Amino acid sequence: MVIKELSKENVEDFIIYLKKAFAIEPDRMTTDHIDEETIIKAVSSNPNELSRSLLAYEDDQIVGRLEFHSYLCIQDAYRMAYVNWVYTLPAYRHRGVAQSLFKAFEKICLQEEINQYFLIQADNQAASRFYKAFEQATSSKEIILRKTIK
């Protein structure tokens, strides 16, 4: 398995992966469509260093993804990140894909001096089993306000 960061060089692979995931499990996707033009534009024209995706490749195709966002607290220069998306194609689950993605993510955190990360947890049995494998991590229920602006 190879882990690569999403870039303009592999955005077409990413779109193919999204289409597969959407066709297989539309209820687990956070949108009702895939806007290829917007994705290509976002990745190609102005990549955001603070929002990134790691892609797990097997047999030259993407089989899993982890998206994270990092930020700096100005008050004390404490660096944090949050993972808001982890998904593995069903045929590749229970084969270490998500673990490999998290290993690569944690390596980036160490390299970039990110002190702590948060994971927005999915609410399904497979995800719950996966979260139990995390060492030296705590789970809690946080009250989050969510407002869609646009």
Image: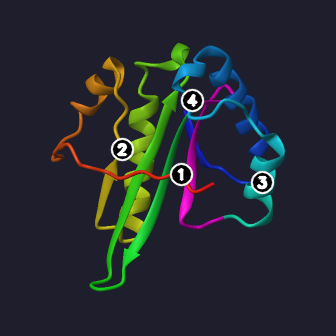
Circles 4 and 3: CB distance less than 8 Å?
Answer: no
Viewport quadrant of the C terminus = bottom right
Q: Is residue 61 left or right of residue 55?
A: right
Instruction: For mark 4, give the secondary structure.
Output: loop
Residue behind mark 1:
148
Kind of residue at badge 4: Met
Give the extent of the magenta segment.
48-63
Q: Which mark is residue 29?
A: 4
Q: Is residue 5 left or right of residue 107?
A: right
Neighbor class of circle 4 (other Cα within 10 Å; few <14, some 14-19, many 20+) is some
Instruction: Calculate the distance from the C-alpha at mark 3 to the C-alpha at mark 1.
Output: 28 Å
Circles 2 and 3: CB distance less than 8 Å?
Answer: no
The mark nearer the N terminus, 2 or 4, is 4
Neighbor class of circle 1 (other Cα within 10 Å; few <14, some 14-19, many 20+) is few
User: Where, by quadrant of the figure, is residue 89 drawn?
Assistant: top right
The mark nearer the N terminus, 2 or 1, is 2
Kind of residue at badge 2: Ile
Instruction: Calculate the distance from the C-alpha at mark 1 to the C-alpha at mark 4.
Output: 17 Å
Residue in view at x 34 percent, y 27 percent: 123
Q: Which mark is residue 8?
A: 3
State whether residue 61 appears in this view. Answer: no
The mark nearer the N terminus, 4 or 3, is 3
